[in-house]
Amino acid sequence: MVSNFSLFLALRYLKPKRTFLSIITLISVLGVMLGVMVLILVLSVMTGFQRELERKVLGFDPHVVVSNGGVLADWEPLSERIAKLPNVEAVAPYVQGPVILQHGNLRLAPKIRGIDPDRERRVSDITQSIHGEFDLDGDKAILGSELAAALGVSIGDKVTVYSPKNIGDALDEMDRLENTEGKKDLAALKQLILPTELEVTGLFESGRYVYDSEFLLVPLHIGQEIYNLGPDVHGLSVRTTNPYHAEVVSRELHQGVLPRGVSALTWMDINKQFFDAIRMERSVMFFLLMFIILVAAFGIMNTLITVTVQKTREIGIMKALGAGMFQIVGVFVFQGIVVGAFGTLFGLASGMFLVQYRNQVRDWLAQALHVEVFPASVYQFSEIPAEVVPSDVLAICLSAFLICSVAALIPAVFAARLDPVKALRFD
């Protein structure tokens, strides 16, 4: 009886009328809807961004990197010991460092990654994003798509690689030759600066701009020659059975497997700053955007306070006729609940719609405003990623609904405490 009576009056008070009060109620509903919609859209996009970034990182980076920060000697016995661990699927050596890359008159300073093609297939998914052939036999190279575009390189072209170490040695030799002459010395100098010419057999497109613009893949022996490593390497790439359990493998490696001075870093450790930044921004955005719903809740409170003032005589009559305190409180609480429920439902529907058609909306905004809304060079993705997490959506909807319901309690309690005698005398 209490709920039926209170709900009946709440719906009657909310019935649209040509008054300023109805406009305020509509604005409150729109405010709740906007807050829920934006929260769902932003959190879904940021979650999608994090998941997509993880996929891109795992497509290029190994699950665990074993290195001593310099040259890793006697790596083959260590590789065999690592491969025997229960949670390890494969191990592959690598050489990585900066070089000078030239094509025609253009020069850039990317990083080479010298790999063993057969072993690399087992530890990395990079082969799935290669256009052309995954051919690194002999003097071959595979360039990132953005790096190739910057140099004007196509499949089948040849590029020239200069080692920074060779250039440093050449400068030292030139200093020594300042006071000497001779063909033998000149021949030695030419040998120092002799570049490596490689044929481009493919282009890889990982989806991350930083990888596609800064890396080229070369055979392991080429990397060893460029850095004068002999049989040594810079580190080992390790693939685990589950990338999200890579920390377990890292702990096992540090417990007696790795020699002194050698460490194991997981892909999460290497990219920690990116993922920490995304998680922090996601939490901050949730609390900041929640203020939109709080503003709408204040609008609901303002509306109900106005209703309380306007309906003072009616409240006095109801209390004189025997209406209880909970019935009067219920009238105004139900108004807040109805406004919060409609705002939340409309926000949920519009938020899911925008998440589904986010890229179409981005293209429309770009055409209408003549501004690139989501530049790939900045965000490293060609499309806006998004992933809806049901628990996040539930938390957003419940929070909005509860805030609106609590906002209605203050005017409801104020209305219920009115003295019926004073209320009936209200003019």
Image (spheres, rainbow, N blue to C red):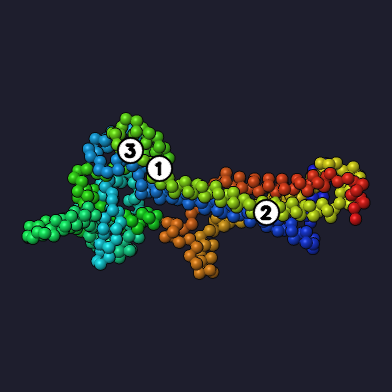
For badge 3, the amino acid type reads Ser
- In the picture of the structure, the residue carrying the numbered disc 1 is 269
Classify residue 5 by image quadrant: top right
Let me know if residue 84 appears in the view: no
Camera-nearest residue between 283 and 42:
283
For badge 2, the amino acid type reads Val
Q: Are marks 3 and 1 in contact (CB under 8 Å)?
A: no
Q: What is the spatial separation of the Cα atoms under label 3 and label 1, in whole angstroms?
A: 12 Å
> For this view, does 355 lie left or right of residue 101?
right
Question: What quarter of the picture does the C terminus occupy?
Answer: bottom right
Q: What is the spatial separation of the Cα atoms under label 3 and label 2, in whole angstroms?
A: 51 Å
- In the picture of the structure, the residue carrying the numbered disc 3 is 263
Camera-nearest residue between 134 and 9:
9
Callout 2 secondary element:
helix
Q: Are marks 1 and 2 in contact (CB under 8 Å)?
A: no
Mark sitting earlier along the chain (1/2) = 1
Mark sitting earlier along the chain (3/2) = 3
Callout 3 secondary element:
strand
> For this view, does 33 lie left or right of residue 133?
right
Label 1 Cα crowd, 10 Å radius (few <14 / some 14-19 / many 20+): few
Percent coordinates x, y for residue 152 in the rendering? 30, 65
